[in-house]
Amino acid sequence: MNLSFEQLKSMVVFAQVVEQGNLTAAAKHIGLSRAVVSYHIKKLETQLGVKLLNRSTRSIALTEAGSEYYQSCRIIAEQATMANQQIENLKNEPEGLLKITCPVNVGLQMVVPALNDFRRLYPKIDLDVMLSDEVVNIMQEGIDLAIRGAPLADSGLQASKLSTLPTCLCGSPEYFKKNGRPLTPTDLEQHTWIIYKLTSGAIELSKGNRSYSVAVKGSISTNNAAARTAFIEGGHGLGRIPLYDAWPKVQAGLLEIVLDDYQLKDIDIYGVFPPGSASSKKLRLLIDFLKDYFIKIERQNLG
């Protein structure tokens, strides 16, 4: 069977429907109407003589044939994206849009200042920055780079480690005046904590060959890192926070670090991106820039 231009288009549309999870989201992502997307899927199924999708009012599910066919359609779509990116990379000055998402606090404290400097270097690169503590679906939202504080979970994506951020245990002078300072890991269990809901309910410490796991409890919990730091600064409890967040407040006398002779777990920061974006010049420039910027910030905090 000869492959027509129209069928190629339908194959790309089908790949988007699978990746976006439904026809409506795919239509929005591609810039077509839902009716046109549905037309392409039905036409493909008619041409191939097999059912590709089982559709309900809210969701889709791949048939066995659809799952096999999607792999070929995905490769075609990725190759087309890479071809465009190769032309883009030939331009002397990188340009175009980069859509970026990252957690709110690390975004405001580190990523947005970095992007300020990046934009001065590359003024023709447009930025669309989404700050959210929720894990954004990269494929559905058309994200070029997601900055996350966890290893890559989805094998369909790629990741590059941007930085390792040291952490520390902090409290306010007011809190320590009322409750005393912990001198050993076991003392930590007697203190009140600001609970950060996106991490486990235990603090891991080590010193030499000894390791400690301390269960934490408290009457204030939050899913926002900036709110956590604000509650600690307000004297409501202890918390484990990144050094980049703590250090300016320590220098200002608003926070104090305790048990700094013990080792805490670092936070690894990753840049996560779709596999088709790996050859994008502007994305590589941004990832390399962020790595260098984070190194500079870490040196400032430690030195």
Image (spheres, helix red, strand yellow):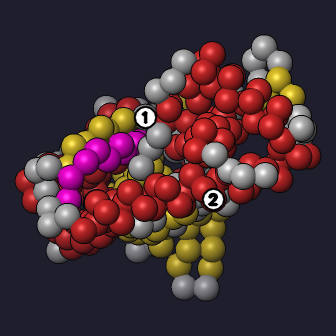
Between discs 2 and 1, the one toward the N terminus: 2
Q: Nearer the viewer, mark 2 or mark 1?
A: 2
Q: Residue at x 91, y 46 (%)?
A: 64
Q: Residue at x 38, y 57 (%)?
A: 84
How crowded is the residue under tag 2: few (<14 C-alpha within 10 Å), some, or many (20+)?
Answer: some
As for residue 98 lying within the magenta part, the answer is yes
**What kind of element bears circle 2?**
helix
**Looking at the picture, does residue 38 appear above or below residue 1?**
above
Magenta stretch, residue numbers: 94-103
The image's mark for residue 132 is 1
Q: Residue at x 46, y 27 (%)?
A: 31
How crowded is the residue under tag 1: few (<14 C-alpha within 10 Å), some, or many (20+)?
Answer: some
Disc 2 target residue: 75
**What kind of element bears circle 1?**
loop
Query: Quadrant of residue 22 in the image?
Result: top right
As for residue 74 lying within the magenta part, the answer is no
Residue extending farthest bottom: 209
Amino acid on which the number 2 mark rests in the picture: Ile
